[in-house]
């Protein structure tokens, strides 16, 4: 396994669990905001093979209401 794969998977799992917590009644949304930002910043580069070669995050269709 690549050196960052475990860290990447763990961080993505924590972000997912935090998203589930944020949807719960009575969730502390200040906590969610603080922790989600910290987790997102600490997210390592995706492991090789996660993103297809040549992928561009800005490529693809426009969002509704946005023109080219």
Image (cartoon, rainbow, N blue to C red):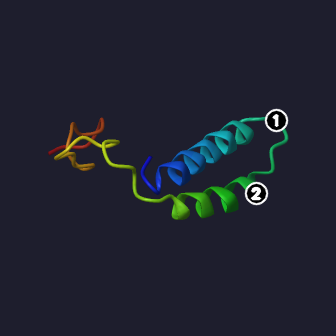
Disc 2 from disc 1: Cα separation:
14 Å
Residue at 21% over, 36% down? 61
Q: Secondary structure at mark 1?
A: loop
Residue at 68% over, 59% down? 35
Closest to the camera, between mark 2 and mark 1, is 2
Looking at the image, residue 64 sits to the left or right of residue 26; the answer is left
Up-down relation of residue 59 to residue 25 (above or below): below
Q: For mark 2, what is the residue? A: 31
Could you say where residue 29 lies in the image, as x and y percent from the top left?
Answer: 74, 51
Could you say where residue 62 lies in the image, as x and y percent from the top left?
Answer: 23, 40
Q: Secondary structure at mark 2?
A: helix
Up-down relation of residue 40 to residue 21 (above or below): below
Q: For mark 1, what is the residue? A: 25
Up-down relation of residue 48 to residue 31 (above or below): above
Mark number, residue 39: none
Residue at 61% over, 40% down? 16
Mark 1 Cα shell of 10 Å, populated few (<14), some (14-19), many (≥20): few
């Amino acid at each position: 396994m690549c050196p960052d794969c475990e860290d990447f998977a763990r961080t993505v799992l924590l972000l997912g669990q935090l998203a589930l917590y944020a949807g719960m009644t009575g969730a502390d949304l200040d906590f969610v905001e603080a922790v989600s930002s910290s987790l997102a910043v600490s997210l390592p580069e995706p492991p090789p093979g996660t993103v297809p070669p040549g992928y561009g995050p800005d490529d693809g269709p426009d969002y509704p209401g946005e023109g080219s």
